[in-house]
Every structure is written in structure tokens, then in C-alpha cells.
Amino acid sequence: MILRQSHIERITLYYKHNLSKCFYASVKFTDTCKHFEFALQNYLTLIDIRDDGYNKKDYQYINGKYTVSSNTGFRKLFLKYKIEYEGNILVLPPDTIFPIVEDIGYPIQYVLYLFDENNELYINLPPDKGKKRTFYHLYDLALISESLIGTLDILMENENVYLSDHISKLYSNINIKIVSVLQKFAILYKKLTGLTLSVRIISLKDINILGVSYPNLIILNETLLKYPITMLYTYMIHELIHQFLGIKIRFTGSGRWFLLESITEYLQCVFVKLIGGNSLFDIMLKKCEELYRSNFDASKKISISEYNENNNEREYLGLICGKGVLVIDMFIEKYGCNEKTLKNITLDLLNFKDGVTIVDFEGILIKYYGDGVKEFFKKWIYTADIDIGSEFFLLERRKSV
Ligand SMILES: [Zn+2]
């Protein structure tokens, strides 16, 4: 059980790069706190904890958690810790260098002060002023040594695209105009969201993911460079869509994975269709159908909206990459979607400050397409296929297409 007697107001991290790789974090509470628990990543070692008067505090370390208690309480704690591992810094949430506190259901302000005289670190969040950066979600932060960045390095600012030499050669060798593909994306992005795209796309070696989006930053696995076409159309475009769906718009609650990944996958197919034509679109949807079919037995017990991170890979493939994408395609075939409606939907989504749930999303669609949307959601998103057999959905979909 976590005893929490006070709200954390903010956590400030001071990072001095060329001084001994030490971190200093100060945790400020809104009122007097008597008990505080936190964790540190295992490559970080705590040096000491001090209170308001800068007196050393005793602490306990049990089961990976540090605990500080005081009868008189404290308003502030200073934590000093160091990095144990050699080499360069690569911080990708949740591998955070901040003390980890439980998810406490209200936003904590995080402040990062960076003292990096050699400009060795790349940080995705722009500074407020000087060395100070403020943010509210730890998973928004990426902190990467420039020396770890691989051969992929692209900068997209408004509708301008800048490429590293290696990437420029890689794509000109296979006759793909990557600059014009990315520019097309940026123009469309602005048209539909009203926002301008500002993002750096880099590759890293030795990461256990293929692609991931942070605010203003996309990281792709260096191994994807062996497959430049897939890298561009599948991974880069996908992560670029997440700059909006996932970062500007947060999804929450049940149905989150459908909203986050199925819609992104579908839009990715639509963009590829704009570039490569209908036949490519058909191939991509056919692939979704295969995923749905081949994972049906593993995924039929739950509905699309019930899928969550505790489910397995086959359920993900079947429901989120397979059926979820096909359901969106079926919706568009049935109800249509013009640019004006799409723009209105994105504006409505931007109004949700605490995350969009599947019910919120359904509500937005009802506004533009009428009450029939309820029936559609109930049948295809809120209900599992268990009783109707694997072919039913696909047959129904064919009828509508
Ligand atoms: Zn994704």
C-alpha cells in the first residue's frame, strides 16, 4: 500500500553532462509530506537524500523502492544519484532518469534543466527558455546522445524536408522521391489538423522496437534501413500519423488500442493509396484480412474494444491490425468521408484534454453520421465474433465494399 499524504507539485531534474554523470532531482510537494516512495532505474544509484534544510535523510530500500519517512514532514526532497553504466545516454521512457512515482491520477509538472556544454545530447522537447524544459508526461521525454544516432536522420519543418546524405542516396538509388512523399504528407497533415509538422526522424541501433513516436521525434530501428520501401511506407508514415493520433490526441480507456493503432494503420493505407494507387490499397487491406483470418481462433473471445495491453500478440494482430482496420474501411464505405467531415472530426478530437475514449469517439461520429453509428459500433466494435464464426464478418464486409 502506498501512503500518500501530499501531492507532488513538481519534480525538477538537473542534469550536468560533463560533470561526473550525476543527476540531482528535487521533488516539491504542495503541502507537508511525511512519507514518500519512489523507484529509480537499475542503472541509477542513489547517493543521498536531503530534506528542506538540506539535512541528510535516512531511507529504506525494499523491493526496488526507496522510502523516506519523517514525523515532522518535509516540503521538498533533494535526491542525488548517478549513472552506473558506461557509454552514452539513451533514455526512452519508461527507462526514465527521473525518480518514478506511482501513477497518481493528476498531472505532475516535470522540469528538466540541462547543462550540456558539448551539445552531446538531443532532447525532443523544446526549451521554454534558456536551459529549462517543462512537461507533464514522462513518456513524452526522449534524451539521446547524438553519437548514438544512426544513418537515418531526417528533419521535417513545416513543408520542408532535410535529409542526411546517406538517406538521400539510399532512396535515389531505388528511384523513390522521398522528399516529395514526405512533403505530400506534411501538406495533408496541415490541411486536416490545422497543425504544422515539426519532427526529426532518426534511427538507433540496439533498441528493442521497430518504430516509436515522441513529440517532435520519431525513432526507427536501424535494421529497417535494409528495407527502405517498407521503412518509408510502413514505419515512417505510421509513426508520422502518430505525431497527431497518440501525441496531439491521447486515447484512453477500453478501445484505446483500436483508436490508436487501427485508425493509424488505416490512415497509413489511405496515404499509401494517394501515393501508389488503388491496387496497393487493396493489397494492404488484403493483408489485414489475412491477419484477421489467421488469428481468428486466438482472438474471437474478445471484442475490438475489449483488447488491452494484457492480451497477447495474436489477439493484437487479429483484432487491432486485422479486424479493426477492416471495420474502419467498412465504416468509410458505408458512411463516406469527405475532407470537411474529417477536419471537423480532428477539431473535435483536439477538444478532449484528458484523452479520448471509444465512447467519446463514437459520440463524435454520431454527431456527423447520425444514430446508425451506435448500431455499427455495437455490432463490430463492442461485440466479439464468438457466436457468428470467422467468415461472417468478412462476408458482411464484402457485401458493403
Ligand atoms: Zn502505432
Image (cartoon, helix red, strand yellow):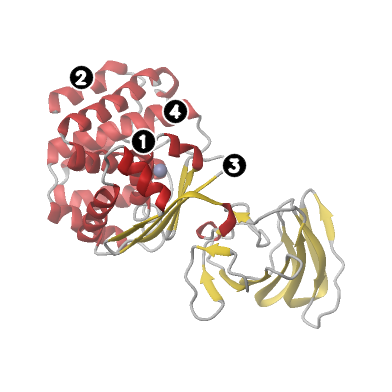
Work out how far the residue at label 4 is from the one at label 3, CA to CA, in angstroms.
Answer: 27 Å
Crowd band around label 3 with a 10 angstrom C-alpha radius: few (<14), some (14–19), many (20+)? few
Give coordinates of residue 155: x percent, y percent: 38, 59
Number of marks present in the image shown: 4
First of labels 1, 2 by sequence position: 1
Q: Is residue 298 left or right of residue 336?
A: right
Give residue 84's position: percent from left, percent from top: 77, 55
Q: Say whether disc 3 or disc 1 marks the residue closer to the N-terminus.
A: 3
Which element is circle 3 on?
loop
Q: Is mark 3 within 8 Å of ligand 1?
A: no
Percent of width and height locating residue 362: 27, 47
Decide: few, some or many residues near mark 4? Use Cα within 10 Å; few <14, some 14-19, many ≥20.
Answer: many
Type of amino acid under label 3: Asp
Q: Is residue 1 left or right of residue 30?
A: right
Mark 3 lies on residue: 206
Q: What label does residue 395 carry, if any?
A: 2
Front in this rendered view, residue 335 or 7? 335
Provide the residue designation for mark 1: 230
Instruction: From the viewer's perspective, tell me whether residue 26 is left or right of residue 384.
Output: right
Please give the residue where the numbered disc 4 appears in the rendered image: 315
Circle 1: element type: helix
What's under tag 2, amino acid-wise?
Answer: Leu
